[in-house]
Image: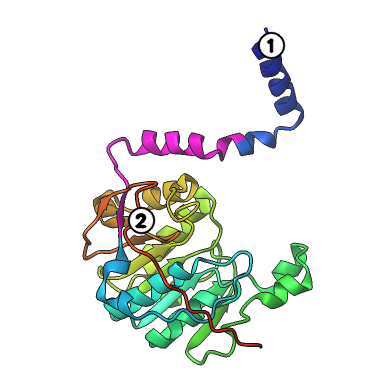
Amino acid sequence: MQKIKKLLKALGLLLRRPALFNLILKDEEVLQQEFKKDFPTLSLQEIDPFAWDEAKELNVTPYAFLSGSSMATDFALLQMLCRRYQVNTYLEIGTWRGESVANVAPFVKEAFTLNLPDDTLQKMGMNQAYIDSHRFYSKNVSNVTHLFGDSATFNWSPYFQNCDLIFIDGDHSTAAVERDTLTALKLRKNNEAILVWHDAKSDAEYPRYEVLLGIYRAMPVELHANIYLVKHSLCAVYLPQGAQGTALQINALPQRRFHLNLKIEQL
């Protein structure tokens, strides 16, 4: 009887506040079941780029240690990919403070990064400090070009078939990830171009199915075998050349330890 009362109360609350249905639909367990329904034979795999030779010497800078940022290992991953695969043209969706593109810039010929214009952020009610934080670390980097617009409506045609690596870090809803991934497929310079998605995991181990649904729905089925979650990172990556992937393991015993030597510079 108590369970029935709780159920009726919950239904009444949902009827009064229909927006709560969105929270239910975005619950990770619900999304995981949806993922399994869409891709019943697919097993998530991961790669460990920190076993690559490119990982022997890493220098992540700048890094803000502030909210909304990536993990330092995410920036390290982007650097390693650019070095390992000799990336010339890098493009990202989602600039924020400009940390990711500033970390990549020393290793590429040219870099492009797209974000909403400042006036759009103002209309959305964002405060000035938040707006001023955009492009903070990348605005004076010589080989970085800042693009402005919404990835859903931006004119991407000048960049089609031009990019060696595309980093998708914009809206993380399933529909937006699917849309941006379809755009990224058109941006690839050739079949050897690399795609990277941020926040494909909710932390360094657990998958984030809201994002993974968008990735796998957009990517052609024949390319699914070369999509990997990245160990020690929030990212997923598509490597057309393939890699030594293993079945995703959560809460496995650590195989290495990282040493961080922090150098702090006053701005």
**Residue 121, percent from left and from top:** 71, 68
Query: Where residue 185 sits in the image (x, y, percent)?
Result: 36, 63
Task: Report the coloring of the rendering.
Answer: rainbow
Dot 1: element: helix
Q: Toward which corner of the image does residue 32 lie, by quadrant?
A: top left
Q: Which mark is residue 267?
A: none
Rendered location of residue 87, percent (x, y): 33, 80
Q: Is residue 36 left or right of residue 72?
A: left
Q: Of helix, strand and loop, which one carries label 2?
A: loop
Q: Which of the two residues, 133 or 223, is positioned nearer the viewer here?
A: 133
Sequence-first disc among 1 and 2: 1
Q: Is residue 40 magenta?
A: yes
The three-letter code of the residue at mark 1 reads: Gln
User: Which of the numbered marks, if any, corresponds to residue 2?
Assistant: 1
- Compared with 32, 212 (above or below) is below
Q: Of the residues shown, which amino acid type is indicated by label 2?
A: Pro
Q: Identify residue for label 2.
A: 254
Label 1 neighbourhood size at 10 Å, few (<14), some (14-19), many (20+)?
few
In what quadrant of the picture does the N terminus appear? top right
Q: Residue at x 56, y 36 (%)?
A: 25
Name which residue lies at 74% across and 32% down.
17
Tell me: 28 left or right of 23. left
Q: Is residue 15 above or below residue 66?
A: above
Bounds of the magenta span? 24-47
Specify whether residue 176 is in view: yes
Is 54 or 168 nearer to us in this picture? 54
Q: Quadrant of residue 165?
A: bottom left
Q: Position of residue 5 (x, y in %)?
A: 71, 13
Residue at left offset 25%, top offset 70%: 192
